[in-house]
Amino acid sequence: MAEFKEISADAPMSEKALTWIDNRFPLSKLYKEHLSEYYAPKNFNFFYFFGALSLLVLVIQIVTGIFLVMHYKPDAALAFASVEYIMRDVPYGWLIRYMHSTGASAFFVVVYLHMFRGLIYGSFRKPRELVWLFGCAIFLALMGEAFMGYLLPWGQMSYWGAQVIVNLFSAIPLIGPDLALLIRGDYVVGDATLNRFFAFHVIAVPLVLLGLVVAHIIALHEVGSNNPDGVEIKAHKDEKGRPLDGIPFHPYYTVHDIVGVTGFLLVFCAIVFFAPELGGYFLEYNNFIPADPLKTPLHIAPVWYFTPYYSMLRAITGEMMYALIACVLVAAYLGATRAKISNTLKAAVIGSAVVGVALMLAIDAKFWGVVVMGGAVVILFFLPWLDKCEVKSIRYRPDWHVYLYAIFVVNFFVLGYLGIQPPSSIGERVSQLGTLYYFGFFLLMPWWTTLGQTKPVPDRVNFVAH
Amino acid sequence: MRKFLIAVSMVLGMALPAFAATDTIPWDKAPNKLNDLSALQNGAKIFVNYCLNCHAASYMRFNRLKDIGLTEKQIKDNLLFTTDKVGDTMKISMDAKQGKDWFGGNPPDLTLIARSRSGSGGTGADYIYTYLRTYYRDDSKATGWNNLAFPNVGMPHVLWELQGQRRPVFEDVVQHGHTTHALKGWEQVTPGKMTPLEYDEAVGDLVNYLQWMAEPNQNSRVQIGVWVMLFLLIFMVIAWRLNASYWKDIR
């Protein structure tokens, strides 16, 4: 506990007030620890805007969300009309709604870029594993938040998208059908589903999200930010214990982030005011038709931010299962012959591979599609322990690592594009290859990240004064 | 700025069509008259007279028509058929069951039709503009009408008195070794009250009205947007200089 500070009676009023608070709440301490004396590396680049921008979008979503809830009716008979009421009769309701709908997509744009930054500069590596884990949990919560929020306008895509995704859960053996029933609250998506999704979207998930965001930031400020060079700035400190390559977050990065925020808002507002549908990507055209349980749309596509995973789901066909079984067998063979592990462990590897293959043959490919889709997100949690490269940042990794990362990005876009398109035979093959690359990239990391000659990592960060 | 942004969004939209094309004829480009109040008023008149009997526009209030330059009195005297309150939405008295019995399907609500029918073939306005101009006589259908943009449509040609009866003329086009049955033109069977040019003009007005009705505030949205962008651009300069003045000490 901090010592109780006394202040002279003729001190200025503001100083007295601050002392009064500081004796009861660590205001100055928090301000120093998280802003004025939080030392961030001075060599942040463009990619380092997206953490602050994620926070901005979170605030936009919460504030616009509050105003939307004031007019929205979570009732299957009224929901669609209440959204149109917001768009037409509520003063500036259209602005609030477009900000919220554009904000949903913007959230994924900034979060994907934020995650990409972490991926290429090794920000998930020791000692930042928990920062990364909290971040992955935020991403998972965000996906749930977006999925449930998308049902609320109660348009055709809302309805059928939810129908398709919830039905996926029924592919899980034994508990599947009951689980799907529990999620829907009915045998088809209906009023009960809308009400529970509303409850989750406006209170349950946002609470979890906020808690995770706080944990993410506290963990980050405990270990300090990484930087594009991947060197620890705490290794070189001045006589006062301040990192030589660090600068106080406030004012340097606050004024810096104002530039980033303005740049972001230029793009965000351009979409909100000039193209709120963004060609059917941010607001799908079919969603301007009220939900009709009797009329299935010809083509049901999730919103763009889910399509890479949706592609992977569709890639898992009966045929693809044989490719996956072959992968499991090769992995088991290599584990049993090459890995330097005890014989008991080797037996366990072979045993689990046999059980795995048996299950893969016994259970429908649809279930494995769901496993792959979920696994594509869950695998991110393991990244800190998969990457074994001796350097953190992509800048000092072998050149061919950079190409693997580049292919990973292109692959992610291709999967995303294919997830929007109606199924086709070529698309299916490409998405199958893409799925194998996506998982291969992560699962083979312990092997490929150790290969190749890394470049010498500098002692201090690279920084060119602006 | 606005044109540029619209162009960018259109290029994006064309480069990555979000939805698959259907196997109907290509859509004609609808004229843009969203800033032409007399065209929108004419469109509103056609809409109320010809569409708003079977189709509702249940999210649209009659008094919102003030936004396209009509007075409350004009609305009351000329456009209120189904209700006597200008604050009411455009509902109809026909119910879903009657719609099903008479047309084989319930006529869709038209409030948002221009937004919901957009796709890779063009905007919803393009679709409706094409659809309302491609009706032809087909005695094999219950209504006696069929449509090229919407084959086997349940809706009869409501505007036929204006357009007259027409027959599509097809020709076989050989392209890359494939023969396709393509629309060559139209043959006027019986004349309508309007010339083909006048009819296209009238349908253009109607389609623009539908487009306006789908989002009545779209013009003010863009106007506000221009000011917001101007503010942000100026603020960007301030933010950039502020940042530079702080960062000049960092070496």
Image: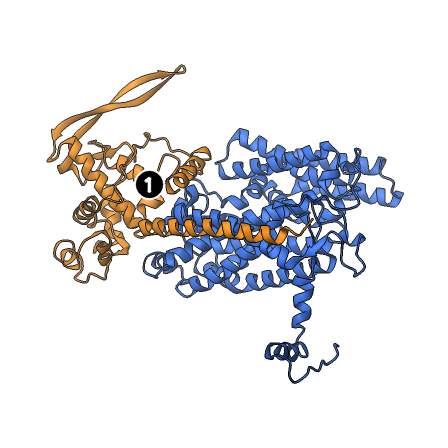
The count of marks equals: 1
Badge 1, how many Cα within 10 Å: few under 14, some, many 20+? many
Residue A83 visible in the displayed image:
no
The secondary structure type at the circle numbered 1 is: helix
Please say if B187 is above or below A320: above
> In x, y percent, where is residue A205?
56, 61
Whether residue B72 is visible to the viewer of this picture, yes or no, is yes
x and y percentages locating residue A14 in the rendered image:
60, 77
Left of B187 or right of it: where is A144? right
The shade of chain B is orange
Q: Drawn colour of chain A?
A: blue
Name the residue at the bottom extreme. Answer: A9
Quadrant placement of the C terminus of chain A: top right
- Please say if A215 is above or below A235: below
**Which quarter of the picture shows residue A372?**
top right
Q: Name the residue under label 1.
A: B124
Q: Where is residue A52 in the image (x, y as percent from the top left)?
A: 59, 54
Amino acid carrying label 1: it is: Gly
The residue nearer to you, when weighing A141 against A194, is: A141
Q: Quadrant of the N terminus of chain A?
A: bottom right
What percent of the width, then of the height, locates residue B93?
20, 56
The chain carrying label 1 is B
Please identify the quarter of the rendering in which residue A2 is found: bottom right
Question: Residue at (51%, 32%) from the top-left corner?
Answer: A424
What scheme was used to colour the molecule?
by chain
Quarter of the view holding residue A405: top right
Q: Is residue A268 left or right of residue B174?
A: right
Q: In the image shown, does A268 or B199 lie closer to the viewer? A: A268
Q: Residue at x 66, y 59 (%)?
A: A217
